[in-house]
Image (cartoon, grey):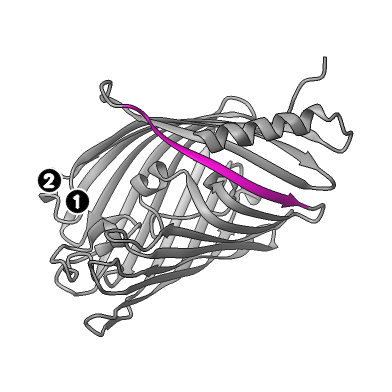
């Protein structure tokens, strides 16, 4: 807290200097999230039932200087529903950011994930990991043009000590529109999960999803009519046991939307993309969600055979203005045996980004 106050004081002194090249800025992000998982029908074989209900608020202030340079600081506060006797969790952020006129951005420090613009599916991040982790400790490179967006994020999320494992990952997304209706895209994660002082062992958890995306809405009276076709390739290596896996699969997604109402279906056929989920580490504990940030539906089948996974979602999404977005989702999950379970999701997001202080 003392360091945070000193940073705020330094920013205030810089602003009071009155230099014309110094520009005050502020951002505020709000996210209300309710995700209710009902998987008792499948005895929770891949995903247990549970509920995420929480609010998070992320205010940031900073200064812009020169052409495209910024220094920002702030915090993220998160509070779970039904925990009135517990204090909210608080996480501070400090980062440098550079933007140029060609759409290039560099950010370094403890920076918010909200700076990212690419699409990350549940192959990379589950609902819980996406919501409960607000900041990356590392670097973000992003190049955004009118018809393309490419980015790479490095996050050092675990520093080696007695009980904490050394851990970092790199995510990358890309999309480039070749025509108004065809884009070449990808998403991927390259994840290093290593030892602590008391538990030895290193696991490599890498996944890549290249795909082509067709957008037919310019040809038809739809807000969105999207078809994505691609492959999924994983590389999993438990170095302690010299156990290497190369799970492969294919995925197709259809998304249709009109007047805010939509249906989205994702179909995957292939192998388990989380083969070490139930494997025990040197301390005798399952790797589970400690290793995998992706949704555990991607175990597909527990018997090691290839199988299918289908996610059917009906939703309503409404932007009230440039800053506020509401969403209601009903999601049904299927495997080769039938219905795994379903989710009900309510979301409210407010994004007040890069707004300038009003002049009197």
* Residue extending farthest left: 43
Residue 12, position as x, y percentages in the image: 71, 29
Q: Is 47 placed above or below 2 here? A: below
Residue at (46%, 43%) from the top-left corner?
134
Mark 1, residue position? 340
Residue 306 occupies which quadrant of the picture? bottom left
Q: What's drawn in magenta, residue-wise?
A: 87-99
Q: Is residue 108 toward the left or the right of residue 345 in the image?
A: right
Tell which circle, 2 or 1, labels the residue nearer the N-terminal end: 2
Residue 347 visible in rendering: no
Q: Is 133 placed above or below 347 here? A: below
Residue at (77%, 30%) from the top-left corner?
15
Q: Is residue 301 toward the left or the right of residue 103 in the image?
A: left
Of helix, strand and loop, which mostly describes the magenta segment?
strand
| Quarter of the figure that contains the C terminus | top right
Q: Residues within 10 Å of mark 2 (few under 14, many from 20)?
A: few
CB atoms of marks 2 and 1 within 8 Å: yes
Q: Is residue 91 magenta?
A: yes
Residue 301 is labelled as none
Mark 2, residue position? 41
In space, the residues marked 2 and 1 are separated at their CA atoms by 6 Å
């Amino acid at each position: 807290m003392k360091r945070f106050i000193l940073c705020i004081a330094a920013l205030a002194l810089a602003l009071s200097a009155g230099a014309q090249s110094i520009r005050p800025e502020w951002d505020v992000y709000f996210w209300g999230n309710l995700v209710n998982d009902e998987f008792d029908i499948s005895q929770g074989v891949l995903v247990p039932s549970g509920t995420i209900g929480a609010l998070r608020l992320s205010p940031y202030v900073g200064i812009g200087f020169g052409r495209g340079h910024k220094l920002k600081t702030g915090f993220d506060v998160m509070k779970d529903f039904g925990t009135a006797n517990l204090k909210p969790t608080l996480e501070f952020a400090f980062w440098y950011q550079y933007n140029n006129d060609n759409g290039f951005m560099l950010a370094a420090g403890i920076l918010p994930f909200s700076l990212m613009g690419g699409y990350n599916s549940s192959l990379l991040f589950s609902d819980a990991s996406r919501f409960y982790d607000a900041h990356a400790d590392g670097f973000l490179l992003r190049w955004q043009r009118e018809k393309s967006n490419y980015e790479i994020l490095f996050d050092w999320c675990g520093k080696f000590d007695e009980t904490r494992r050394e851990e970092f990952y790199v995510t990358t997304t890309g999309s480039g529109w070749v025509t108004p209706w065809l884009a070449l895209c990808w998403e991927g994660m390259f994840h290093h999960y290593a030892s602590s002082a008391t538990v030895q062992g290193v696991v490599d958890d890498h996944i890549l999803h290249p795909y082509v995306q067709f957008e037919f809405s310019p040809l038809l009276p739809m807000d969105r009519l999207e078809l994505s076709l691609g492959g999924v390739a994983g590389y999993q290596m438990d170095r302690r046991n010299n156990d290497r896996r190369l799970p492969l699969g294919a995925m197709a997604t259809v998304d249709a939307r009109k007047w805010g109402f939509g249906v989205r279906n994702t179909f995957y056929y292939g192998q388990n993309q989380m083969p070490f989920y139930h494997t025990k580490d040197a301390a005798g504990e399952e790797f589970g969600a400690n290793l995998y940030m992706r949704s555990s539906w991607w175990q597909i089948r527990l018997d090691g055979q290839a199988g299918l996974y289908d996610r059917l979602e009906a939703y309503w999404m409404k932007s009230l203005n440039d800053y506020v977005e509401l969403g209601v989702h009903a999601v049904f999950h299927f495997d080769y045996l039938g219905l795994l379970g379903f989710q009900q999701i309510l979301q409210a997001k407010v994004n007040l980004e890069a707004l300038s202080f009003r002049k009197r």
